[in-house]
Amino acid sequence: MVNIKNYTFRASLLIGLMLFLFSCSSYNEMITPYYKQVASGNYTAAMKELEKNKLLQKPRNKLLFLLEKGKTTHLMGDYENSNRYFNEADQLLENGLGGTMDAVVGTLLNPMNQVYKGEDFEKFMIHYYKALNYVYLAKPEDAIVEARRIGLQSQEQGDKFNNKDNRYAKDAFSLMLQGLIYEYDGDMNNAFIAYRNAAEVYLSSKDQTYYGTPMPETLKQDVLRTAAAMGFTAELNRFEELFHLKYTPEKAPEGGELVFFWENGLAPVKAQEEFFFSLVKGEDGNLFFTNVGGTIIIPFGDGYGSGENFNVNAIQSLRATYPKYVSRPPFFSTATLTDGKTIFGFQQAEDINELAYKTLQQRFLKEMTKLLTRLAVKKSAEYVLKESSKGTGKNGKDNTLLEGLGFGVQLYSLLSEKADTRNWQSLPATISYARIPLQKGKNTISLNLKASNGTEETKTIEVMGTGRLQFFNYSTLR
């Protein structure tokens, strides 16, 4: 009997340790070879790493696979294929991801085994790259379609949260991009509406800052300029007062303007964080989870009612895993542009680092409630098995197997818990932009980059001034 018990214990422990070793690796660690190649600018090698990565080949990670391929082919200048991947990703999102069985997988295993559905800000960034791809492919009509889809997604996102609790309901950068695309197409009326909507997002906060990004001065000028161009005097006066600016008309540059986007660094990666909770019954009979210090109070999940019939004795402690973002400081800290006569500074348009941290924090309570309730239900099942094994021996029956099963379930539950550490990690940490006036014909524009250690680099491009608005984006991925 003792030998059987020892064997069962060792077998359970071995299985548990195997699960533990597998679960230690984060998503970032499992696809490090790909990200190393991306950060080094070796995009062809990066594509090969993507193709042979078994984790990204799994159906549950198809969205991430398409997003990474779309971004990498964009960096390679293969804009046609880039949009092919992004369009497929878009289609996945429109058709809906997950389902009943996917939810069951998340309950029995962990969120890492569910279909990846994307962060809200990642969905907006798809439009950014698709719109630029269409512009570079000389397909303005498709770029306009993408601009309109930004508006539709902003509306859906607003409906999702109903603009409560200062949640991420609209993306100011995407609305600003929408305005730029409309202006690129010569549609000043819709450009004004988009610029105004972007400005309203900033104005809705007390300090005119949205997720770590102050309202760009260029955006203010774009609102005033397009309002004046459309003859919207009342709107012009209103925004002059709100911005504390007086609009002064200026002659449009003969060669048009260049909108230069600087994508700096890489988005933060997700790691795993651990929390320990107990299930407690309150004076009103309802159950809630609390951590050791009592600083976090989380109600028992609504899906199981108030928990009146739930066995609190089964839940002595719970180990919960939750993702946390870890930023990757960019190599370059500042940058300027020059046309040989004038130096132009950049203005931040999007802080993906800040967006990632804040949006994850905003959904902590909701997701931790679901997670802890799921863990409590699993813990209760373990308790039932253990209690059953205690009473099995009365008729002389061997309870070793049931004991071992109970221990195995306990060990599995403990070690299989894993936070979902997946995210679109080749996104930039920040996006800044500048509008540069162009002269007719050839223009030489230099990007001067400076790192905190004093290292400097210069990138030079040539732009033909055509009288229209043009775009260029440049990534520094270190």
Image: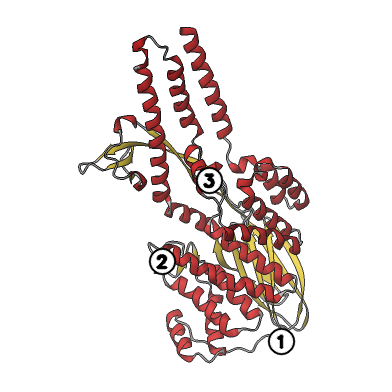
Q: Residue at x 53, y 67 (%)?
A: 153
Dot 1 lies on which element?
loop
Q: Earlier in the sequence, mark 3 or mark 1?
A: 3
State how far apart marks 2 and 3 are (Cα): 29 Å
Percent position of residue 361, x then y: 44, 52
Q: Residues within 10 Å of mark 1 (few under 14, many from 20)?
A: some
Q: Earlier in the sequence, mark 2 or mark 3?
A: 3
State how far apart marks 1 and 2 are (Cα): 42 Å
* Residue 399 falls in image quadrant: top left
For residue 87, above or below residue 426: below
Can you identify the residue that label 3 sits on? 102
> How many numbered marks does the figure carry?
3
Residue kind at label 1, given as amino acid type:
Glu
Q: Residue at x 54, y 45 (%)?
A: 114
In-front residue for pair 393/141: 393
Can you identify the residue that label 1 sits on? 254
In-front residue for pair 468/194: 194
Q: Mark 1, mark 2: which one is toward the viewer? A: 2
